[in-house]
Amino acid sequence: MSNATYDAIVIGSGPAGAMAARTLARRGRSVMMLERDKLPRPKACGGGLTGNIRKSIDFELDDVVENVVTRTFCVFKGTRSILLQPKGLHVQMVQRDKFDNYLTQRAVADGAELRDGTPMRKMTSEHGSKIIETPSGTFKAKVVIGADGAASPTARAAGLRLNTPLGIAMDADLAVRPEQYEKWKDTAIFDFGIVPHGYGWSFPKKDFFSIGVGTVESHFPTARAHLNDLMARHECLHDSLSMKLRSAPLPFWTHHEEIAVDGVFLAGDSAGLVDPFSGEGISYALRSGTLAAEFAAARLAGDSSAEAGYNEMIERTMERGFAFALRLANIFFEHPNVTYHVGVRSQAVNDIFAKLIAGEIDYVELYQELAASWPGRFYRLLKPLLKVLK
């Protein structure tokens, strides 16, 4: 049994936790990562890296990038489909077990300590420090960064995000025949109109497809049936050779919440920082992990306003964009037929979204560009009629 004291303890070793631990270690702080599972460990996630990733890391990812998506195949209610090649679309694909472990090892190389297979059992406060109890011993730190997922035990222990609704995702790695993979290896599939308040997807990896279904609804008893339907609807997913199934809660952002208090800073999924329109969370995990570490370092240096500063920074730099993304999500789910045919099938709209994915614009700018496009103007003309027909 161990008993040790650190400047900081990071709970979770996903993208947010790894970046937080690396940032603190590079600042000369003693930091330990606690990871519940043995690494590498799988995670339900599409594994697409957007252009914003480059703004958050200062090293190459060539060792873990398995493929690049340049085309999209969009389907509505299983029949109406369109193949598009948005201008500048370039989404790198990774497997989350390899990607997360790679980031974690970068943190370890920079001085962070890792204890995997070590879940947190309890967190308490004592004389200005946090006491973390685990099966392997009790550890103490001045600050704690919670990066332990959508159902974060750290958040609950700190009294944060107690009543936040969670969506649900189920995904699988699907091995297929070489000829199927070869035909679709550069194409992401998005399947709309069947999953309630959500969508299905297929992303090509090195020699297989990651497929999944996700919804913002808190109950999804038909997830497996929808996943089977997704496989049946798309030729690249027929006659699979093997399948590895996973499921996970989804912490879609819905409104501003405090995510730092009394020496505890939440980041990534633990903080609910997942795009409410696309479900993308990796880029926000990387950015928030780094920011959480910077404000935690300020707290260690005696800044009593560090928690308030972190809350304000996340609200200003991420949540403002999420508010526009949520507005788009609500429009899409309220009028899926119209938005699919006017928006999803539009080359102009896809080109605008490709700029967002590349990190060239943010959601505020995207919303402005969509509003100025002909699909945006057409939707505004239809909106009064749609309210009547609703």
Image: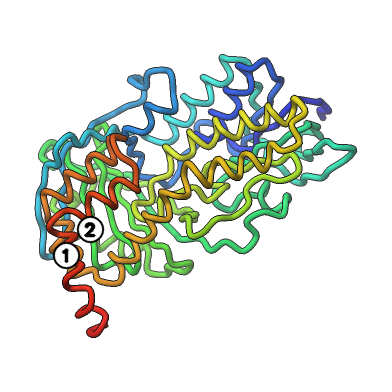
Q: Are marks 1 and 2 in contact (CB under 8 Å)?
A: yes
Which residue was labeled with disc 2? 191
Quick check: can you spot residue 107?
Answer: yes
Mark seen at residue 2: none
Residue 170, how many percent across, how many down? 39, 55
Q: Amino acid at mark 2?
A: Asp
Q: Amino acid at mark 1?
A: Gly
Judged left or right of residue 370, residue 180 is left
Q: Residue furthest right?
A: 127
Q: Secondary structure at mark 2?
A: strand
Q: Earlier in the sequence, mark 1 or mark 2?
A: 1
Residue 130, how many percent across, how many down? 80, 38
**Mark pair 1, 2: CA separation:** 7 Å
Q: Secondary structure at mark 1?
A: loop
Which residue was labeled with disc 1? 78
- Placement of the N terminus among the 4 image quadrants: top right
Residue displayed at 58% across by 23% down: 23
Residue 230, how many percent across, how many down? 24, 59
